[in-house]
Image (tube, grey):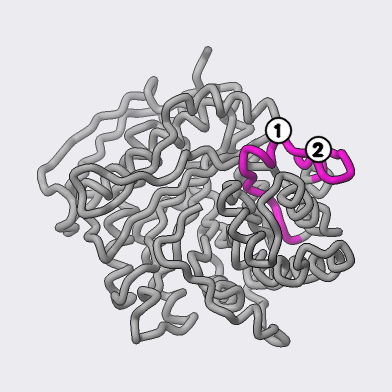
């Protein structure tokens, strides 16, 4: 199939310059020369990828991450006394996607594979419900974290095998973006091996996704686990993001057709020194300006175990002045926690639960616009949601 050239002239990137001063990464110089014929994606998808990314990164909107695996969804249901059955998972997911007017605040929804092919309790395809709400359907494509041999008790993300055929099938089912989560642990290093594995895996996934029409959400999560100060998080994230974007370029990924889903720069969850929203915003935006090309349409932050209110306050602080990118949210627990507790598995609570979801979505919509005040928040919304070694 013909390809669309994205660059008119060759470009030389010297990796030693790209990550200069980062002792965790290898120090020798590696020069890579790219040629016009190499920097391309399938011509049939290039324009669509850019359009999809811009749609998801639209003003006042963000992503609802509802891609918990069936096992993790079971843990959520167990917290309100429900069994982990397909019927219960279906009922909860129906509640989420049918919340009236959700698309006013939510531009994309990340789904688990079961959900992508699932119907609501009324028999309508969940994908169709999302499209009717003006919400772009997305799909989690990684196969989860496994131990990384030769590392300091670190992990790597599996799922590249068969990804191309799965991505093509997901596109046919209606998905238009994908998500791949890999993590880096500060208490365990991070080792150069773990950082490189995370970056390379994300880059290969991104290239394969774009080749099959899906906008890749690139998610290099710096775990909150640990007692480290916010400055250590900044240092590690700077190293990781440099490695990720080097390999994205090396794999000919179209930056205009991706979305970045990073963790905010915060102290470790067990640190005695807490950071204000202004401090979090200052360091996070500094890091974005140093590492992320302005051609990336959207920065869709994960909440990473922050409370609902904390995640919203930090996002709001980052939007007090214009940014080169759409700075927004891609939250799971920080959008769903109060909603789930309000529902409690009871049909008569569905409307109240949907109202709770809409309240959180609206709060984060205001935060994306820099207009959130934090007034009138419930005590439930202020509860910490951190889980050590979180996986899903």
Taking depth in this image into account, of 83 and 38 the one nearest to the observer is 83
The image position of residue 390, as x and y in percent, is: 45, 60
From the viewer's side, name the closer residue of 293 and 73. Answer: 73
* Residue 64 found in image quarter: bottom right
- Marked residue nearer the N-terminal end (1 or 2): 2
The answer to whether 362 is drawn above or below residue 24 in the figure is below
Q: Nearer the viewer, residue 114 or 284?
A: 114
Residue 354 appears left or right of 197:
right
Q: Residue at x 40, y 61 (%)?
A: 389
**In the picture shown, does residue 33 fall above or below 181?**
above
On whether residue 116 falls in the magenta region, the answer is: yes
**Rendering coords of residue 213 (x, y %):** 59, 29
Indicate the position of residue 307 as horizontal and vertical percent values. Answer: 56, 75
Residue 361 seen in the figure:
no
Identify whether 85 is placed above or below 43.
below
Tell me the element at label 2: loop
**Element on which disc 1 rests:** loop
Instruction: Identify the magenta region.
Output: 105-129
């Amino acid at each position: 199939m013909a390809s669309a050239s994205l660059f008119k002239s060759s470009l030389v990137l010297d990796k030693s310059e790209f990550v200069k001063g980062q002792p965790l990464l290898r120090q020798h110089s590696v020069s890579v020369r790219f040629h016009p014929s190499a920097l391309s994606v399938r011509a049939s998808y290039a324009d669509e990828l850019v359009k999809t990314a811009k749609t998801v990164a639209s003003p006042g909107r963000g992503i609802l991450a509802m891609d918990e695996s069936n096992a993790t969804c079971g843990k959520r249901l167990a917290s309100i006394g429900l069994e982990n059955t397909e019927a219960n998972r279906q009922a909860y997911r129906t509640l989420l996607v049918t919340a009236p007017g959700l698309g006013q605040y939510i531009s994309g929804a990340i789904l688990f594979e079961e959900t992508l092919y699932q119907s609501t309790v009324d028999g309508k395809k969940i994908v169709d419900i999302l499209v009717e709400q003006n919400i772009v359907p997305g799909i989690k494509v990684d196969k989860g974290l496994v131990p990384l041999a030769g590392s300091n008790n670190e992990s790597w993300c599996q799922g590249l095998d068969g990804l191309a055929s799965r991505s093509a099938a997901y596109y046919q089912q209606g998905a238009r973006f994908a998500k791949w989560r890999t993590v880096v642990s500060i208490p365990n290093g991070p080792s150069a091996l773990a950082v490189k594995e995370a970056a390379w895996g994300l880059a290969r996934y991104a290239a394969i996704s774009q080749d099959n029409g899906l906008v890749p959400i690139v998610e290099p999560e710096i775990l909150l686990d640990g007692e480290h100060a916010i400055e250590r998080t900044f240092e590690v994230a700077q190293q990781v993001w440099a490695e990720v974007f080097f390999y994205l370029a090396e794999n000919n990924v179209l930056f205009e057709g991706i979305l970045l889903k990073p963790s905010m720069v915060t102290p470790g969850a067990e640190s005695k020194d807490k950071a204000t929203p202004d401090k979090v915003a200052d360091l996070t935006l500094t890091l974005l300006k140093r590492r992320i090309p302005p051609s990336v349409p959207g920065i869709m932050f994960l909440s990473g175990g922050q409370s609902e209110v904390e995640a919203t306050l930090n996002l709001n602080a980052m939007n007090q002045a214009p940014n080169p990118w759409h700075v927004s949210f891609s939250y799971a627990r920080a959008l769903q926690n109060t909603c789930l507790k309000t529902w409690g598995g009871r049909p008569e609570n569905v409307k109240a639960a949907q109202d709770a979801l809409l309240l959180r979505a609206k709060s984060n919509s205001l935060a994306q616009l820099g207009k959130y005040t934090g007034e009138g928040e419930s005590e439930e919304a202020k509860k910490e949601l951190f889980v050590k070694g979180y996986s899903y």
